[in-house]
Image (cartoon, rainbow, N blue to C red):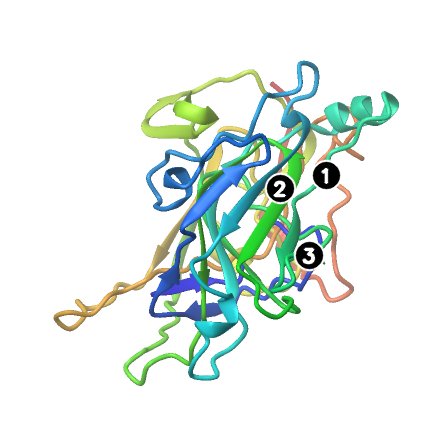
Amino acid sequence: HMTLDERMWTGGPMVTGKPLFYRHAVRPVRGWRDDGLDVTAAVQEVDHNAAEPGDLHPRYLGRLDRQRAVTLEFDKPLDTYNKHGHNNPVLLADGWVEYPYSQTVFAAWQADERYFAPTLEAAGADGQWHTVYPSFGYPAGMPRQMSVPLEGLPQGTRKLRIRSNLQIYWDRLAVIYPQEPADGVIRTELGLQRATVSQSGFARRTNGSQQRPQYDYQDRVPFWDTRYPAGYYTRLGDALPLAQKVDGAFIVIGPGEEVQLDFQALPPGPDGWTRRYVLYTAGYAKDMDMYTQDSGTVGPLPLSPTANHALHEQYNTRHRQGF
């Protein structure tokens, strides 16, 4: 199996994006919320049936009415699974989050309320709880998988506890032990052949159970309740030179737009092999929240001293503003 060292980082070990290979996932034998709600079945498998986070705050989007904790208990100490001297254990998590907006966080701050990213705690052989990371992050947005290295666990750890007041839906929680990849693992970087900017419209969004977002690309509408921040966007059509390497030259797209990426095709893999695709991107996004700095304009772009300004001048020539 393979996962990535990837998450919305708020603290703890820095994210590397590197692949992690493992053979088995150690699942908890019991899981419960701090109010006693049993969530064992909810965190066993990736089935879009997540552990209920708790009551939502009546005023603030993406926040619970209080801090909640999910405790995981394993059948034996986590250090006893590491029989062959493999790397430190890693917490593997699948789930999704409901994001607040800048103005929501600011309003909460004015009311002396705060948003607390997940804290990770562990109970050692003595039964005492120790803080592993006061803040470590969460799966960023849409349903996805994340991981965080479990460094510095107390000896004999059988219980882990995640504490937060964010509206996070934990779908699967487990512990893995990364290993060196098998001899047959082959890493292939596919060449990007085309990058095409177009106005594709807005995929219709629906919410599944537990606020799980779903977008239907086949059901798109041309307009939505959005505006363009004022500035220059990448012209429609070919934009391949902007996407070929990390050089500070951005493809800039606005609401209802897309960049379609076409890569060279791979031949079918050998029988019995599994192929995993990883999309690597370097960039950023900005919204138009009233408390987002420079929210009404495309610029200023976070350009490096070595940014390829010539490409911007050639391709980012399409001025848009408003609706």
Disc 2 vs disc 3: which is toward the camera? 3
Q: Is mark 1 on a helix, strand or loop?
A: loop
Q: What residue is shown at x 84% (from left), y 27% (from top)?
A: 109
Q: In which quarter of the image is residue 285?
A: top right
Image quadrant for the N terminus?
bottom left
**Label 2 crowd (10 A; few <14 / some 14-19 / many >=20):** some
Q: What residue type is labelled 3?
A: Gln
Q: Measure how far apart labels 2 and 3 are at the Cα level.
A: 61 Å
- Give the side of residue 294 with respect to residue 53, left or right: right
Residue on which the image places disc 3? 128
Q: What element carries label 2?
A: loop
Residue on which the image places disc 2? 317
Mark with earlier residue (2, 1): 1
Q: What residue is shown at x 57% (from left), y 48% (from top)?
A: 251
Q: Measure how far apart labels 2 and 1 are at the Cα level.
A: 41 Å
Image quadrant for the C terminus?
top right
Q: What residue type is labelled 1?
A: Phe
Position above or below: 105 against 126: above
Mark with earlier residue (2, 3): 3
Q: Would you say the residues marked 2 and 3 are in contact, meaning their CB atoms lie under 8 Å apart?
A: no
Residue on which the image places disc 1? 116
- Give the side of residue 141 with respect to residue 187, left or right: right
**Label 3 crowd (10 A; few <14 / some 14-19 / many >=20):** few
Mark with earlier residue (3, 1): 1
Q: Quadrant of residue 99?
A: top right
Decide if residue 236 is in sight here. Answer: no
Q: Which amino acid does label 2 sit on?
A: Thr
Q: Would you say the residues marked 3 and 1 are in contact, meaning their CB atoms lie under 8 Å apart?
A: no
Disc 3 vs disc 1: which is toward the camera? 3
